[in-house]
Amino acid sequence: ARGGFGGLLLYRLGCAALMALGFRLVTRQALPALVALGVVLLLPWADRPMMLSLALFPTVLALCERRRFGWLVAVTWLGIVLHRAALLCYAIVAARAVHLALARLCARWPRLSIVAGPPPSRRTLVAALAAAVAAPLVGLANPQGMAAFTTGLDVAGSRMMRMYIAEFQALGPAALWSWDGAWAAVAAVAIAARVIVAVRRRERAPVDAWHLGLVVLFA
């Protein structure tokens, strides 16, 4: 509380560094890291406690992309210790495990495999499924215990809290009629078009159903 604006600035810089780490795991280019720095410094709500967990989210996505499931258990544990917003990370890890299982099942059909994505080895699939189960279990070892998992549901179920906390407000289809929805639609169309081209050429694309699902989910 005594840090003043300097403390808040350091907090934002720390969150930006965490976001930049996630982008760095995926690409060697400096632009994504610079974008992370600018976004965190300019967001009006970036001083909220949940920003630490959200800053880890790009790292979780990057580890899912690179199939580093052992590290995911540690990163998601750190996220839930910082804030319950990390619950979203557990959902992403589980979704990635399901996606890899489907990709392995689709491996026998070449064109469908292009859509589903590169099939994982048996060892990778076992690691993904193990991480999906182990991550939330390890996450119970946090200062709040089970409450870190359940209080979010309690808040989401409270009509009064949903009125005042933006991320718990009910959003209908009309919320997609915005700049965020427009960018999501452009990204979804671009991914779908690239996958269609890859299927016709019978070659793998740098994107697949996993990336399309992420765009649709966070639209």
Image (spheres, rainbow, N blue to C red):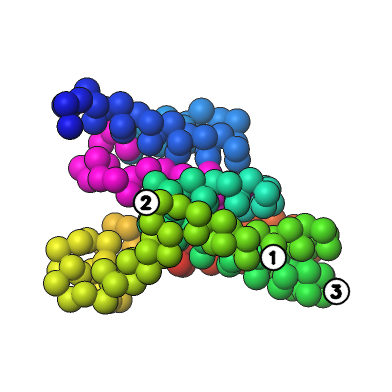
Mark 3 and mark 2: Cα distance apart in space: 42 Å
Residue tagged 3: 108
In the picture, the quarter occupied by the N terminus is top left
Q: Earlier in the sequence, mark 2 or mark 1?
A: 2
Look at the image and say whether residue 167 sits in the magenta stretch: no
Residue tagged 2: 83
**Type of secondary structure dominating the magenta stretch:** helix
Q: Position of residue 93 (x, y in %)?
A: 58, 60
Q: Earlier in the sequence, mark 3 or mark 2?
A: 2
Query: Which of 20/161 is in front?
Result: 161
Query: What residue appears at the point 25 percent right and 36 percent down from the top-left corner?
Result: 42
Q: Please say if the residues under marks 3 and 2 sit with CB atoms less than 8 Å apart.
A: no
Residue tagged 1: 129
Mark 2: amino acid: His
Mark 1: amino acid: Leu
Crowd class of label 1 (few under 14; some 14 to 19; many from 20; radius 10 Å): some
Where residue 161 is drawn, which disc sits there? none
